[in-house]
Image (spheres, rainbow, N blue to C red):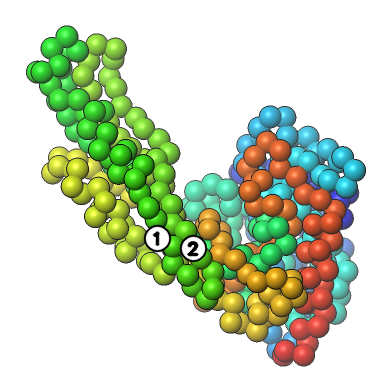
Amino acid sequence: MLDLAAELVAIPSVSHHEGRIADTVEEALRSCPWLQVDRIEDNVVARSDHGRGQRLLLAGHLDTVPPAGGNETARVDGAVLYGLGASDMKGGVATFLRLAAAIPEPGVDVTWCFYACEEVAQRFNGLRRLWEIAPGLLDADAAVLGEPTGGLVEAGCQGTMRVRLTLTGVRAHTARPFMGRNAVHRLGPLLAAVTGYEGRRPVLDGCTYAEQLQVVEITGGVAGNVVPDRASLLLNHRFAPDRSVEEAERGLHRLFDPYLEPEDEWTVEDASPGAPPGLDHPLLADLVAATGAPPRAKVGWSDVATFWEHGIPAANFGPADPLLAHTPGEHVSADELAHVQRVLEGLLRTSRDRT
């Protein structure tokens, strides 16, 4: 398993450049005669058709963020694989490919879905493209997304929103600032509001979702001797799945409206709702039971929300520590891969009793 994961890590697949790894995945799945394989752009879907009573979809994205610190090279040290995508999420992809080849007669029908462009803007997301082009390929009763979770079930996910606040001022010479109004200085109270922000921590089905708010970009300035007349703040808000996008935005308005004026601009640059835990589905409840540990909340966003949007309950479950995702030192161990493989193999082989 570690060798297969290392082979995948060695294939560069930064978002929008997944062609080679999609070729590798497609070839592996086409070697399984019990699977019907479809390739749409750089998204690969393989389906069994045994006439079972339920269908479980297992999905993993093929892309990575750009390399950092030389981690584009796969390196195995003992029983640990280091390299770009080792944790997010080529370890999970390797596990799914191994299981697809190892279980020709699962107790439920299975759909294996490998897709592109998860790490970039939603308009490029390969899973969304599949729903646009061939939604029938994604029909399922429940889904498991192979995001890194440390071998625990992470339930649902939080919503995410990026809001840009653009404040206005009056341009002037810096030698005579009293003739103008500095738009950058106006950002101060907004920054203080973010610094003092205390997010909600709602508990849903025993899982605590801790809301977050961060400034991710500040822009402003004209020249070294000019009082700037415009400045903007880009905020990223992670909100619990008990609130809609509209409710989360209203919460931000309550926080920032006291500092805004009629000429200022409020722009939602992108937003995606979250997903509730959804672990009451029998297949997902069995998954939790098979791990032998209680679930926890997914405090980030994942495509579990995309499945929920289309009426499919889903959970995150995969190898590797999620805190390592997108870091120069991300890695996954052979033990982590083996644990996830054992849990999922048991689920796929024994789920016949639930149909």
Task: Name the residue tied to disc 2.
Answer: 209
Answer with left or right where residue 10 lies relative to residue 169. Answer: right
- Measured from the top left, where is residue 337 in percent x and y? 81, 58
In what element is the residue under mark 2?
loop
Q: Tell me which amino acid carries mark 1.
A: Arg
Residue in front for this viewpoint, 193 or 61:
193
Q: Residues within 10 Å of mark 2 (few under 14, many from 20)?
A: many
Residue at the spot x=34%, y=45% of the render?
Answer: 196
Tell me, yes or no, whether the two marked residues, 2 and 1, touch with CB atoms within 8 Å: yes
Q: Residues within 10 Å of mark 1 (few under 14, many from 20)?
A: few
Answer with left or right where residue 187 lies relative to residue 99. Answer: left
In what element is the residue under mark 1?
loop
- Measured from the top left, where is residue 343 in percent x and y? 79, 70
Q: To which quarter of the image does residue 304 belong?
A: bottom right
Residue at the spot x=29%, y=58% of the render?
Answer: 251
- Measured from the top left, where is residue 244 in percent x and y? 37, 66
Residue at the spot x=44%, y=62% of the render?
Answer: 201
Residue 230 visible somewhere in the drawing? no
Q: To which quarter of the image does residue 133 belong?
A: bottom right
Residue at the spot x=68%, y=56% of the render?
Answer: 148
Q: Tell me which amino acid carries mark 2.
A: Tyr
Q: Is residue 253 above or below residue 9?
A: below
What quarter of the picture does the N terminus occupy? bottom right
- Measured from the top left, where is residue 116 in percent x and y? 63, 52
As measured in the structure, the alpha-carbon distance from the residue carrying label 2 to the one carrying label 1 is 8 Å
Answer with left or right where residue 262 lies relative to residue 12. Answer: left
Task: Name the residue tied to disc 1.
Answer: 200
Residue 296 visible somewhere in the drawing? yes
- Number of marks present in the image shown: 2
Q: Is residue 102 above or below residue 76?
A: below
Q: To which quarter of the image does residue 181 belong?
A: top left
